Image (tube, rainbow, N blue to C red):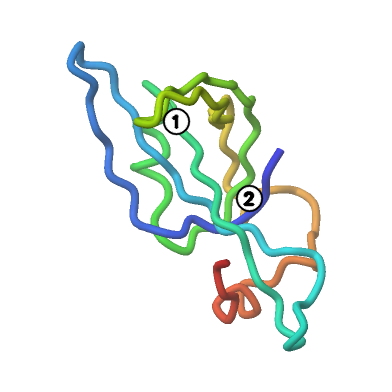
Amino acid sequence: MLIGYVAYDLEIKETPIGTKVVDIFLKIRRSFKNQEGEYTCDIVKVSVWEALADYAVETFSKGSKVILKGRVKPNKVTLSTGATITVNELFADKIINFDDYPFDFDEIDKDENKEMKAE
C-alpha cells in the first residue's frame, strides 16, 4: 500500500487492442530529512487499468492525495547491450481518495509536500 500525492495530471491511453490504462506518478515523502534538513520524496510509477483507469482520471488530478493498493510484477527486460535485467512494475488494484479516508494521518501534510524535492 502506498500513500502519496499525484505528481502530474493524469492522461488515459489505450493499448492497440483498446484496453484503457493510465500511469500515476505518485510522490511519496520519505520519513527522514536529508543532510540539508529537508524532507525529500520519491516518485513511483503505478499503472492503472480498465475501469479503475477511468475512475482515476475522473477523480484525481495533480496534487490529489491518494492511497494505492496493488501489486509488484517483475518483468525481464533485455537491454541494447544484450544483458537481461528484472524491472519491477507496480499495478494498482484499488485507489482510495485520501481525503475521504476515515483515519487521520498527521505525518503527511499537504503543505510540507509542496516543498518536497524529488530525487
Q: Quadrant of the N terminus?
A: top right
Residue sitting at x 38%, y 58%: 8
Mark 2 element type: helix
- Using the image, determine if residue 28 lies above or below residue 84: below
Q: Give the total of numbered labels.
A: 2
The residue at the far bottom in this view is 36
Of callouts 2 and 1, which one flags the residue occurring earlier in the amino acid sequence? 1
Residue 34 placed where, x, y %?
75, 78
- Using the image, determine if residue 10 lies above or below residue 37: above
Residue nearest the viewer, comparing 104 with 24: 24
Q: Give the class, few, some or many, for how many residues have Cα within 10 Å of label 2's Cα (few <14, many ≥20).
A: few
Give the quarter of the image for residue 72.
top right
Question: What residue is shown with label 2?
Answer: 100
Residue 6 placed where, x, y %?
48, 55
Instruction: Measure how far apart labels 2 and 1 are at the Cα level.
Output: 20 Å
Residue 48's disc is 1
Q: Quadrant of the C terminus?
A: bottom right
